[in-house]
Amino acid sequence: MGPQELADIIRAAVNDAVQRGVIALSKAEIPAEIVVERPKNPEHGDWATNIALQIAKKAGMAPREAAEILKPLLAAIDGIDSVEIAGPGFLNIRLSAASQGELARQIVQEGQTFGRGTGLVGQHINVEFISANPTGPLHLGHTRWAAVGDAIARVLEAQGATAAREFYINDRGVQMDKFGASVQAAAQGTPIPEDGYHGEYIKTLAQEVVATHPELMTMTGEEQRVAFREASYEVQLADQKRVLDLFNTHFDVWYSERSLHDSGAVERGFEKLRAEGHVFEDGGAVWLRTTDFGDDKDRVMVKADGELTYFASDTAYYVDKRARGFDLCIYLLGADHHGYVNRLRAVAACAGDNPDENIELLIGQMVKMMKGGEEVRLSKRAGNLITLEDLIDEVGVDAARYSLIRYPVDSPLVLDLDLLISRTNENPVYYVQYAHARIASVVRNAAELGLIPADSLTWDPATYDPSLLVEERESQLLGLLADYPRIIAGAAELREPHRVARFLEEVATGYHRFYDVCRVLPQGDEPVTELNIARLWLCAATRQVIFNGLQLLGVSAPERM
RNA sequence: GCCCGCAUAGCUCAGUGGAUAGAGCGUCUGCCUCCGGAGCAGAAGGCCGCAGGUCCGAUUCCUGCUGCGGGCACCA
């Protein structure tokens, strides 16, 4: 029995009391969602609900009074050991070991599907992140969303949504020309233009471009300029893809800004916005009246000189995403783009959509990196560039992803490289992975001793007797595991995958605490008992939850470390 | 000036209205004849930035203030 079942039971109890007229409440006044949570203090039981506090006022009674009515109804349920009223009117519920332990069986049998939900079934969600210019390597500023964006998509999928990871390639405009000119200059040994790109990578890029396209050096003028730009673009984009692949972030769609213009999507976007009546002309320029929907100024789409603005691409891109069938477009942006939030929401409104339903913009604050007690400075246009690949090289994919995801994105993140490199238990990813490896080792040993097959999916459920798991720490661990589906659902709903990471750390702690006092395998010549087997089920369930959780973060769950 | 975010233990940070506010690190003290000690147990350490408001109840929601980070374009 877990929180979901308990919520149903509590709802039934409230309905019952209302029906009998003991609690004066209308059907509509019964809360849609019954909150069942694990109390912070384990002495308060396995699960707690604040339902009595919620309904007391409407029912015209004191919270404790309402609790008194519900208490016997709950206590009578099979599987509930005891119910206590505490504090202002909480109902603290303690489950029987057998009822609570059922969960381990469920987890082991469901395997990798345990924890999945159905809250977002049928939703087509576009998750756009990174969207860097293809004018240089992905750097530290991109890493946060490379990890978090992917984790958000994974968590959404775990709730049944179709989530497309999309990378918008800014391959149009003057930055591309400057980029091409910089590589060209480097290849020819002439000074790089002052407003060009001066990163160290330009030199190696030039070498690679010349090596793969030797014919470029024989070209001249405009032809050569364009050829360098295109060749550099190709190489650089491939490099970004390669590094993201390495980072375990795989995009479903690479959407080129050029293709947006070539495909007629820009015209279609204009038509759509015109039809909705928010386009106007002023001073020779074409504007979108975003101030109709909360933007602080109207935005230019076509400049007086006839050039399209970047904003025009943005609007067309949004309209195009919706036309491709996405119900919701999530944009993951850096803090330096927060000014985009209102205008993009206004774009959605101008396109006739509901900004609260069809578009969502998440802002991630800056990432800083410390090394040797000093901030590692980074600059895309100068040397001393810290790239995503540097980070991977230094700390590995797992540590990098985990430490980037572990914090909510709305506060600035400082990564201490020395700490991440040190590979001690100060780095929580090792703590969690260690727990997984430790369990894997125990199960492995059990299989070698012939206690149970190696693959827990093949275990015979009849061998498991959950009522034997009566130790406090066994119960606490089971309760923690039972909370996993709720954590995942919350992480998806709030777009906060860091909750998964934090939760896994709790599970790891819960396991270590259990392991410390509960012997799993028989010692020496001791005979194999049902308790050994029951604990192995608990181990396997814990391992599965850690595995599933790490999976959602894109972090590996090692069998050995 | 206007907009966004943040402010919680010495440090780095969790905590989507509830009970005695938590973790890691750092400091101090214990625990391996035994399944992985990359672990566990304990101690010390807090006007949850300040002031109001809403609420039975506020670290959490609202307003103002202070401090810190980021942002304002017919740039991309």
Image (cartoon, rainbow, N blue to C red):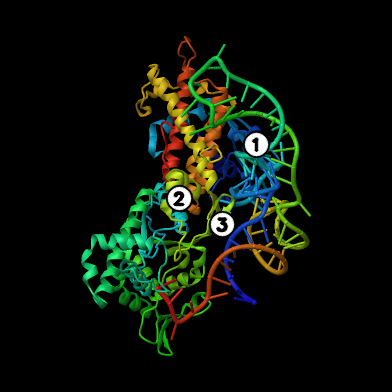
The first of marks 3 and 2 along the sequence is 2
Estimate the x, y position of residue A544 in percent, counting from the top left.
43, 34
Tag 1 and tag 3 share a subunit: yes
Q: Is residue A285 left or right of residue A63?
A: left
Q: Mark 2, residues whose alpha carbon is within 10 Å: few (<14), some, or many (≥20)?
A: many
The kind of residue on which mark 1 rests is: Asn
Q: Mark 1, residues whose alpha carbon is within 10 Å: few (<14), some, or many (≥20)?
A: few
The kind of residue on which mark 3 rests is: Pro
Q: Which residue matches tag 3? A: A412
Q: Is residue A334 depicted above or below A561 in this figure?
A: below
The first of marks 1 and 2 along the sequence is 1
Circle nearer the viewer, 1 or 2: 2
Q: Mark 2 lies on which chain?
A: A
Q: Which residue matches tag 2? A: A391
Q: Which residue matches tag 1? A: A41
Estimate the x, y position of residue B7 in percent, counting from the top left.
66, 55
Q: Is residue A388 left or right of residue A77?
A: left
Element assignment for label 1: loop
Element assignment for label 2: helix
- Residue furthest to the top in view is A525
The kind of residue on which mark 2 rests is: Leu
